[in-house]
Image: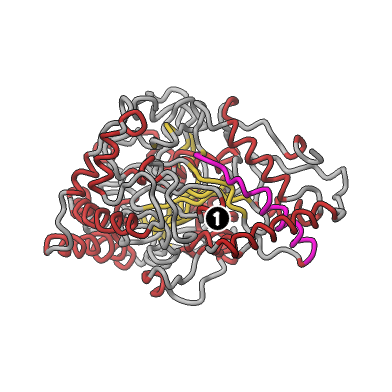
Amino acid sequence: MGAKLLTLFWAWLALGQSLYISRPVVSASITTPLPDLYEASVIELQAGLTSGQFTSVDLIKVCKHASINLQGPVLRAVIETNPSALQEAAVLDFERLTYGPRSALHGIPVLVKDNIATVAFEGMNTTAGSYSLLNSVVPDDAGVVKRLREAGAIILGKANLSEWAHFRGNIASGWSGRGGQCTNAYYPNADPCGSSAGSGVSASIGLTAVALGTETDGSITCPANQNNVVGIKPTVGLTSRAGVIPISEHQDTVGPLTRSVTDAAIVLSIIAGPDPNDNFTLAQPMPVPDYIMALSNTSLVGKRIGVPRTVFLNDSLTGNDPYVNQIFEQALETLQILGATIVDPTDLPSAYEIYESNNETVVLDVDFKVQLNAWFDSLVANPSGVASLEDLIMFDNNNPTLEEPAGYTDQSILIESQATTGFNASYYQSLAFDKELGATNGIDAALKMYALDALVLPAPGYTTVPAAIAGYPIVTVPLGFYPENVTIGSAGPETVYPAPGVPIGLSFLGTAWSEYSLISFAYAYEQKTQTRLQRKAYAAAIPTTQLANVIGQ
């Protein structure tokens, strides 16, 4: 953006803020209780904004205060907040008063994962958690961020993540050089899972209204699973990856992490759609559905839901605690009560091949090197001087205090990726095998063979792999919580998993572009069980700042 245009932008913000401040606001009745931000939905927040009970400026003040207070050793869910957010909120408040809201996300704070680009002049970094990208300048907002801004959403800040979206080495989930070790809000020092760790944790306790994450294989589904939130991993190509620090164009996708299926549907309806800067999005069916219309308590009536047991429910292969399958069996009973026919088993013909295959690793290693080097090339500036994957490996080794503290030194995946030689015959063979194993002889085969509407599995384990290599969607909702007597395991130098009270998720899987159906099934299950409300985070992890603390301040 040129200097003149930038000056005009800030002048508009200042004008909007001054006009907003000088304009009287019609307040809601003092008897109307303020929403508790720990659980508040987008719809509840919009109602309060529309009635004048509070403003977007108030919301941003609360969220920024809570995020800053929880950046320390407790959770470390947020890497940085947006220094322009209050000014942007003031402009959007004034616009609401003058013209009405643009969308259900007008004036709503959205936290985005730190691999999703935002323009540098706004004051935030885009680093994938790495100091090698600190103060780098991206050419533009990510495609999904553009859609959020057009809808009137406010980018609250950047969420912590597993560095490089957990594609660096054998390092604990939720750790990044810049953000440190993010931890779960449901048990002290519990694993938040990743790579969208901060997005999941922040949504789970109301640090933000909604959050965005990305998934290559498990990085939305797993944080949803372990943080008692809803996660939608969309079909590859439904949401734009333009401006997202990549792993692989064949598997990367962007989706919401929220406290309810309704909020997730609202966000997905806004961020989905074609983007000329991401060719994969041009293949999606049009028009983009209004996913809110999928929300029905009776959506499971008459539907055939399959259970692919082989591999995915075998604890000796998945490593899951036996309790996961126990509560999953209860979920199957609930689905039947809701009118579904449970077809069990409906095994994927390729299940064991998926478990044993190395094809995904081959594809991701090659794609990452090529696409990350392209990312570095695309930057307007990068003060660290890192311009390639090879440079990155050297940067980490040369800056051990920042990037290789004790317990977080491994770079084996980066090194493995750097050793690849590009798009050769082995790569294309692995890419084809992935599609065959995940889709043709995997999810699609089971759906067709048993005339199914969807598959269902507990989220932990290998659940995400078939959908990852096929590029297919997963919708995950809260299923339950580990019992108090669960054996606590080690997940990293500072983290544990499983642990008492840590959440477990339920995942619905389907074929390409089946988000509408999966959302409808997840919604019916969520409304019946209300699992999220059965347990709150541990006391020290719950933000204490609420709207009442900032209104009028």
Return the residue nearer the eye: 405 or 15: 15
Q: Which residues are magenta?
A: 79-98
Residue 245: % across, % down: 38, 54
Specify whether 359 is left or right of 153: left
The residue sitting at the bottom extreme is 286
Q: Position of residue 461 (x, y in %)?
A: 32, 42
Question: Residue 42 at x, y = what percent?
Answer: 65, 53
The quadrant of the rendering that contains the C terminus is top right
Q: Is residue 407 above or below residue 534?
A: above
Q: Is residue 257 left or right of residue 490?
A: right
Instruction: Say which of 246 and 18 sits in front.
Output: 18
The structure residue drawn at horizontal position 87% and vertical position 54%, both measured from the top left corner, is 24
Specify whether 320 is left or right of 537. Answer: left
Residue 93 belongs to magenta span: yes
Mark 1 closeness class: few <14, some 14–19, many ≥20 residues within 10 Å: many
Q: Which quarter of the figure has residue 397? A: top left
Q: Residue at x 53, y 41 (%)?
A: 80
Q: Furthest-left residue in view?
A: 425
Q: Tell me if residue 506 comes above or below residue 180 in the rendering.
A: below
Magenta residue check for 71: no
Q: Residue at left 20%, top 65%?
A: 432
Q: Main secondary structure of the magenta part?
A: helix
Q: In front: 465, or 402? A: 402
User: x and y percent of residue 479 in the render?
Assistant: 48, 42
Residue type at tag 1: Ala
User: Residue 399 falls in which quadrant of the image?
Assistant: top left
Q: Mark 1 falls on what kind of element? A: helix
The residue located at (56%, 52%) in the rendering is: 122
Rendered image quadrant of residue 253: bottom left
Which residue matches tag 1?
Answer: 264
Above or below: residue 180 compared with residue 470: above
Q: Tell me: residue 503, above or below residue 417.
A: above
